[in-house]
Image (cartoon, rainbow, N blue to C red):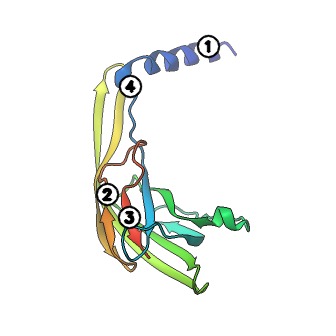
Amino acid sequence: MRFFFPIVFLCAACLNDPDCLVATTNLASFNFKKADGKTADTLWIDSIRVSGYKTQFTINDQDAARRNVTGVRLPVYPGDAQTTYTYYYKKKKDKTQQTAVLTFSYYKNIKVISKKCGAFVFYENLSLVKTTAGPVKIVQPQLNTTVTSNAEIVF
């Protein structure tokens, strides 16, 4: 218990410095669009495999409201300069299992913000390498917590 107070104090001290409040993340936001590229599309997600991770991201919920989504936030793999996402999904109209594979590349930039804050990893220049889905539009190539969409995907 005696170590708890110094650790809390150190963490709180860093959060008081405006330079330490960095919005960087390793989560990319993907929104689904219909063929017109403007209207949101809804997919029934069964699971998504993300390269570099041993487990598959699954939605173990039969509640349609939770499985029918118009977008997802998924991690990029920090140990590589690109990540492949394999989507296992169903469309409303046909209900047949479909698969789409998308590979994105990015640049991992480590920046020292200040001596007090230390270093942060920034993921920048997100770009599409290949896809078996429809067109993909990169909306915001930098990953951060304030972005609502990094890419729009037509399935």
How far apart marks 1 and 2 lie (CA) works out to 43 Å
The reply to whether callout 4 and callout 3 are in contact (CB within 8 Å) is no
Q: Which residue is mark 3?
A: 152
63 vs 38, left or right, is right
How far apart marks 4 and 2 lie (CA) works out to 26 Å
Q: Which residue is mark 1?
A: 5
Across the whole image, how many numbered discs are drawn on residues? Answer: 4
Q: Nearer the viewer, mark 4 or mark 2?
A: 2
Q: Residue at x 70, y 65 (%)?
A: 60
Q: Nearer the viewer, mark 1 or mark 2?
A: 2
Helix, strand or loop status at disc 3? strand
Say the numbered circle drawn on residue 139. 2
Residue 66 lies in quadrant? bottom right
How far apart marks 2 and 3 lie (CA) works out to 7 Å
Amino acid bearing label 3: Glu
The reply to whether callout 2 and callout 3 are in contact (CB within 8 Å) is yes
Q: Residues within 10 Å of mark 2 (few under 14, many from 20)?
A: some
Amino acid bearing label 2: Val
